[in-house]
Image (cartoon, helix red, strand yellow):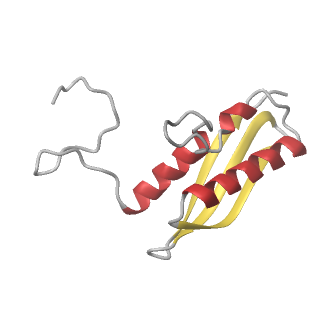
Amino acid sequence: MDPNVSFPLTGINEDGMLNWSTDSDSVREVIWNILLTEPGERLMRPEFGAGLNRYIHYPNNETTRRLIADVSLNALRRWEPRIDILELTATSRPDELNQVTVTVIYRTRATGAEDTLQLGLQLGF
């Protein structure tokens, strides 16, 4: 294996194969993938993804935050069957007018473990 490869690889197993993320790491990575993939970007699954990057030029107001939350919730419910969404919010702070934080609190169905994922988006004013 080339030591200059800069992918975030998790290593090679004893069979010489790449290690794949498992359990909670896999769930977390798929959530990120769903939120940041633009519908139409993925071959063979043109409806996949929430496409949150499309909101970066929207104003940071209640309407935009509600759109972000709704799109995120619908995409996660559709594309990640291993979790139950306990809470999903899109919030901003008055001192960071261009920053929106998407917070997903979820439970993994297989283990019952709860976890939280936060994603920050820079929006227009």
Percent position of residue 122, x then y: 71, 32
Q: How many marks?
A: 0
Q: Residue at x 75, y 45 (%)?
A: 68
Percent position of residue 93, x then y: 80, 44
Q: Is residue 109 above or below residue 9?
A: below
Q: Is residue 25 above or below residue 87?
A: above
Q: Is residue 117 above or below residue 8?
A: below
Percent position of residue 47, x then y: 61, 44
* Residue sticking out furthest to the top: 4
> Which of the two residues, 41 or 122, is positioned nearer the viewer here?
41
Q: Is residue 66 above or below residue 124?
A: below
Q: Residue at x 65, y 38 (%)?
A: 51
Q: Residue at x 83, y 41 (%)?
A: 64
Residue 109 appears left or right of 19:
right
Residue 46 appears left or right of 113:
right
Percent position of residue 4, x then y: 24, 23
Q: Which image quadrant is residue 38 in?
A: top right
